[in-house]
């Protein structure tokens, strides 16, 4: 890629083996060391749980549903989420490293003070997503829908948006300098000229953004 960085893929066990009960596995982990490793969960539900820490590594989640989770710290390393339901999930101080989300529904999900490193979102439904005080380092959004998403105080030193619908997104103190948005939908943005400065857009997108300049384009 022209920006010179590549995504590190999740490193998973060669044979995930047995399918586990998610809530039972998490509750057991919380009673021990707070760690889960190398497990596969299919069609499970996890919600209304709380604890100090929860660390998951080398895990695969397929068609799982996540409800309200209240932890002092959560981390996901080398994990894959496929066709999972994370809508309206609220998480604070979570870390994601080498994680893939594929065909997941994340409508209204809120993430505050999170760290995302080598994370891929592929064909995910993410309308009304809210990111606040997060850092995105080597993060790709590909084929996603992020309509009316909110980005507040987000640092994105290495992020890409590819064929993604960002219509009516709101950007607050989130610089987009160097970001290539040419394949994305950006109509109806609420963004300051300071944050927008240096972004790469098409001529047609410039017309869509003309309202930010307070000018009217005539033929």
Image: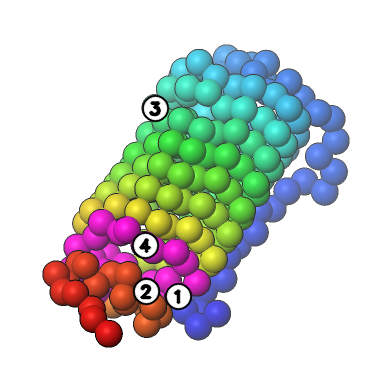
Secondary structure under tag 1 reads loop
Which residue matches tag 3? 72
Disc on the earlier residue, 3 or 1: 3
Which residue matches tag 1? 182
Q: Is residue 160 visible?
A: no
Which-is-in-front pick, marks 4 and 1?
A: 4
Disc on the earlier residue, 2 or 1: 1
Q: Position of residue 196 (x, y in %)?
A: 26, 69
Q: Position of residue 37 (x, y in %)?
A: 68, 35
Crowding at dot 3, Cα within 10 Å, few <14 / some 14-19 / many 20+, comes out as some
| Residue 106: numbered disc | none
| Residue 205: numbered disc | 2
Q: Quadrant of the N terminus?
A: bottom right
Which residue matches tag 4? 187
Could you tell me how many numbered marks the image carries?
A: 4
Q: Residue at x 62, y 28 (%)?
A: 65
Which-is-in-front pick, marks 3 and 4?
A: 4
Q: CA distance from mark 2 to mark 1?
A: 8 Å
Q: CA distance from mark 4 to mark 1?
A: 12 Å
Q: Are marks 3 and 1 in contact (CB under 8 Å)?
A: no
- Foreground residue, 11 or 158? 158
Is residue 211 magenta-colored? no
Secondary structure under tag 4 reads loop
- Foreground residue, 43 or 7? 43
Which-is-in-front pick, marks 3 and 1?
A: 1
- Foreground residue, 96 or 65? 65
Q: Is residue 60 left or right of residue 180?
A: right
Q: CA distance from mark 3 to mark 1?
A: 38 Å
């Amino acid at each position: 890629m022209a920006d010179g960085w590549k995504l590190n893929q999740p490193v998973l066990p060669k044979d995930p083996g047995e399918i586990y009960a998610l809530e039972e596995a998490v509750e057991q982990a919380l009673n021990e060391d707070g760690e889960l490793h190398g497990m596969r969960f299919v069609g499970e539900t996890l919600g209304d749980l709380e604890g100090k820490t929860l660390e998951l590594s080398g895990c695969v989640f397929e068609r799982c549903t996540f409800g309200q989770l209240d932890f002092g710290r959560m981390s996901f390393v080398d994990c894959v989420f496929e066709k999972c339901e994370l809508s309206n999930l609220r998480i604070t101080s979570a870390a994601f490293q080498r994680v893939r989300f594929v065909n997941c529904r994340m409508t209204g999900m809120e993430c505050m003070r999170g760290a995302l490193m080598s994370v891929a979102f592929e064909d995910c439904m993410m309308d009304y997503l809210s990111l606040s005080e997060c850092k995105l380092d080597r993060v790709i959004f590909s084929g996603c829908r992020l309509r009316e998403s909110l980005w507040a105080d987000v640092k994105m030193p290495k992020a890409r948006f590819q064929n993604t619908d960002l219509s009516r997104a709101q950007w607050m103190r989130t610089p987009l300098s160097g970001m290539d948005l040419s394949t994305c939908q950006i109509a109806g943005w609420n963004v300051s000229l300071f944050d927008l400065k240096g972004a790469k857009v098409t001529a047609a997108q410039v017309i869509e953004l003309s309202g930010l300049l307070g000018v009217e384009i005539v033929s």
